[in-house]
Image (spheres, coloured by chain):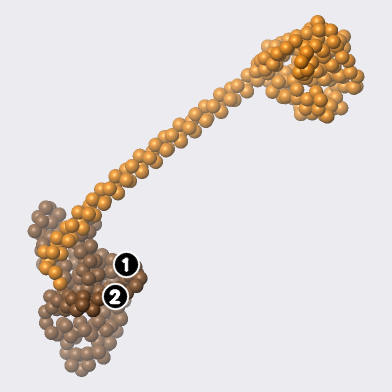
């Protein structure tokens, strides 16, 4: 699989079903990734939908030089940072709705993280500082290469290396001796 | 979490909205460009017409002697009753003979016409004080001797000329109404004035 680039090429050629394939392959992982920044599942969904609608509207912005997944994550990251900057106040959620929001988050985790091992790591990753968490997320959950991770995070390879090194040290502390095997 | 299908429907709805907005923005941009172009065209036209009028103004100034004569001739509205002549020494003569007054007036206007027939534009008049006939500045204190000639009509209107013996004849301190006379013309006018 070429992480959606082939499907997108077919979509550009007029094959509407190719868009469904891209959605299936990348939508939830984009929501999961954006949620790592915004810590708000509905905001993350909204941003992900916006990123995908841009893919439909601005058909020639993606130039196939990187994987479609990397491109979408780059756009998603920048939208997420914008979202955080403009989110001036914390929006309070009614208690009755709060359960739904929490359930939505759980649903997403179930969809994206099928196995228990990943879920435990995800919990630990959530406790890391944001940059470290994002770096681990991209490498560990999304299987991006170091170079792709660096492009998405707008950092160089060395910075990503350092972030991962420090993140692993932190994770060992958080997960304890049992967790050592998870990494 | 919603179904993937409902996300897709929402994505397509947003896409349509964005496309519509983009079209509107493009239309606005085109309109703006048209307005800018129109403004530029109008601005250029105004600028060009300004240049034309400046050129025509310059052309008018080239014809200054003629216009000086025309303005002197045109402002003759009523017959003159008297003329007061004052020379550079301060000596004042008043002539009330209408025939003589008319003759002197005619002579001055003739000088304008004659001077215009000759090329006078190369002569540059040095700055001289000459406000008006009742003005405090009496130019004969200057180094060039001359006369102040003031005509008065029946209803009290006055017209004032200044005549320097170096050849300049000017109305009412107005450089636009000045002409340069030949030595012969100067002599003729001087004789008329002293005869008066």
Residue B148's place in the image compared with A2, above or below, is: above
Q: A47 or B164: which is nearer to us?
A: A47
Q: Which chain is orange?
A: B
Label 1's element? Answer: helix
User: Badge 2: how crowded within 10 Å, few (<14), some, or many (20+)?
Assistant: few
Identified at 9% across, 55% down, the residue is A15
Q: B95 or A57: which is nearer to us?
A: B95
Residue A106's place in the image compared with B68, above or below, is: below
- Please give the chain letter of the residue carrying mark 1: A
* The quadrant where residue A47 appears: bottom left
Identified at 22% across, 90% down, the residue is A175
Residue A96: which numbered mark, if any?
Answer: none
Q: Which chain is brown?
A: A
* The quadrant where residue A177 appears: bottom left
Quadrant where the image shows the C terminus of chain A: bottom left
Which residue in the structure is indicated by mark 2?
A: A92
Quadrant where the image shows the N terminus of chain A: bottom left
Identified at 33% across, 46% down, the residue is B29
- Relative placement, left or right, of B104 versus A120 is right
Residue A171 image offset from top left, x and y in percent: 25, 87
Q: Nearer the viewer, mark 1 or mark 2?
A: 2
- Asked whether residue B107 appears in the rendered view, the answer is no
Residue A174 image offset from top left, x and y in percent: 25, 89
Label 2's element? Answer: loop
Q: Marks 1 and 2, Cα distance to the nearest angstrom?
A: 20 Å
Identified at 42% across, 37% down, the residue is B40
- Relative placement, left or right, of B164 versus A23 is right
Which residue in the structure is indicated by mark 1?
A: A82
- Please give the chain letter of the residue carrying mark 2: A
């Amino acid at each position: 699989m070429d992480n959606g680039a082939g499907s997108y090429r077919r979509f550009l050629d007029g094959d509407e079903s190719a868009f469904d394939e891209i959605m299936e392959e990348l939508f939830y992982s984009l929501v999961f990734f954006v949620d790592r920044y915004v810590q708000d599942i509905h905001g993350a969904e909204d941003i992900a939908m916006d990123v995908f609608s841009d893919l439909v509207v601005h058909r020639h912005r993606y130039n196939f030089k990187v994987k479609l997944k990397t491109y979408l994550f780059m756009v998603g990251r920048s939208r997420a940072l914008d979202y955080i900057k403009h989110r001036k106040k914390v929006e309070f959620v009614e208690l009755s709705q709060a359960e739904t929001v929490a359930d939505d988050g759980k649903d997403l985790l179930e969809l994206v993280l099928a196995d228990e091992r990943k879920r435990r790591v995800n919990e630990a990753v959530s406790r890391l500082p944001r940059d470290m968490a994002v770096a681990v997320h991209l490498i560990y959950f999304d299987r991006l290469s170091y170079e792709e991770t660096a492009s998405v995070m707008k950092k160089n390879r060395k910075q990503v290396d350092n972030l991962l090194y420090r993140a692993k040290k932190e994770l060992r502390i958080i997960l304890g001796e049992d967790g050592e095997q998870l990494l | 979490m919603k179904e993937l299908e409902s996300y897709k429907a929402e994505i397509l709805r947003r896409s349509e909205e964005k496309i519509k907005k983009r079209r509107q923005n493009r239309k606005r941009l085109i309109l703006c460009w048209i307005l800018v172009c129109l403004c530029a065209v109008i601005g250029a036209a105004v600028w060009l017409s300004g240049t034309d009028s400046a050129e025509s103004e310059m052309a008018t100034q080239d014809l200054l002697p003629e216009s000086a004569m025309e303005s002197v001739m045109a402002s003759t509205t009523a017959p003159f009753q008297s003329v007061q002549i004052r020379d550079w020494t301060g000596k004042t003569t008043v002539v009330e003979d209408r025939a003589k007054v008319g003759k002197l007036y005619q002579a001055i206007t003739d000088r304008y016409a004659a001077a215009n027939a000759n090329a006078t534009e190369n002569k540059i008049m040095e700055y001289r004080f000459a406000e008006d006939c009742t003005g405090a500045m009496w130019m004969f204190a200057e180094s060039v001797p001359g006369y102040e000639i003031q005509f008065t009509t029946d209803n009290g209107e006055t017209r004032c000329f200044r005549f320097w013996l170096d050849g300049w004849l000017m109305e009412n301190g107005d450089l636009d109404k000045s002409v340069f006379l030949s030595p012969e013309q100067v002599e003729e006018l001087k004789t008329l004035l002293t005869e008066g």
